[in-house]
Image (cartoon, rainbow, N blue to C red):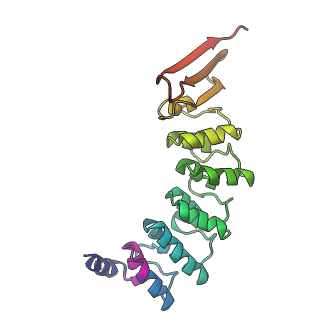
Amino acid sequence: QKEWMLITNLAKALVLFLAALENKHTIAVELLIENGADVYCQNRSNKNWSNYIMNCDEQEINDVIQILLGKGININGRFYENKSMLISALENKKRVVADFLIANGADIYATCYYSGSSCLHYAAAAGFDDIIADFLDKGLDIDRENNMRHTPLRLALMNRKCDTVKVLLSRGASVDDGNCSYSYMHYAAKISDKSIILNRRCPKTTGLFSALYIEPASGPLCLRTSLNCTTS
């Protein structure tokens, strides 16, 4: 069945190398590259290897990327959706691949042209806490907003990455909601770990302070929101 799918996709794409990648035949991919396959080829849909590689198993991806690097592929080149390989790996939650790329000199300061997200945004959404710590140690902006005005902290909350939220808060991430439609507390209320505390001045209600307290996980799952007027 796999062989038939490969033949079918070959007929559509007219590129054996891409058809092998699309069907996760990484051994065939390696053999084709070693025998002179054009690693820069595109099919009739203008797709290249980067469109398909992240569907493979992580170690297989590393093996293929290692061969591609040996053939001159730029590790920091812009590929599928104008994203770098590192951004694609982080976005697809390919931890082993991300580690491999970082160790081999991938640009951690790259951003996605379309979303405006940094590598830190994608790492926060994926919950890769030690990668986040490394990024912060190397100077990435913890409070940078992407084009949707999402910070790494907001993405961690949206993806319910509790440990990541704690890491970012411990490193000084801002909890100022700015002009976003949903507050940090809106997302914090949905996560399973009940040990996170966010304190902030409510920006839309003058004279009010808003605080979200969530009981520790070992205690009652009790959510309390308090609004206290201040004297002028």
Please determine whether, in this image, residue 220 is positioned above or below residue 125.
above
- Along the line of sight, which residue is nearer the eye, 53 or 84? 53
Residue 213 x/y as whole percent:
57, 23
Can residue 173 be seen here?
A: no
Q: Please tell me whether residue 15 belongs to the stretch shown in magenta.
A: yes
Q: Quadrant of the C terminus?
A: top right
Residue 228 x/y as whole percent:
62, 12
Q: Please tell me whether residue 130 belongs to the stretch shown in magenta.
A: no
Q: Residue at x 61, y 38 (%)?
A: 166
Question: What predominant SS class does the magenta segment belong to?
Answer: helix
Q: To which quarter of the image does residue 11 belong? A: bottom left
Residue 151 x/y as whole percent:
62, 43
Q: To which quarter of the image does residue 103 belong? A: bottom right
Residue 113 x/y as whole percent:
60, 58
Which residues are drawn in magenta? 14-27
Please determine whether, in this image, residue 128 is positioned above or below residue 168.
below
- In the displayed image of the protein, which residue is found farthest to the top? 231
Q: Quadrant of the N terminus?
A: bottom left
Q: Residue at x 39, y 79 (%)?
A: 20
Q: To which quarter of the image does residue 145 belong? A: top right
Q: Residue at x 62, y 75 (%)?
A: 74
Is 56 on the left-hand or right-hand side of 102?
left
- In the displayed image of the protein, which residue is found farthest to the bottom? 35
- Along the line of sight, which residue is nearer the eye, 63 or 52? 63
Q: How many numbered markers are drawn?
A: 0
Q: Residue at x 50, y 40 (%)?
A: 160
Is 7 on the left-hand or right-hand side of 39?
left
- Along the line of sight, which residue is nearer the eye, 199 or 197? 197
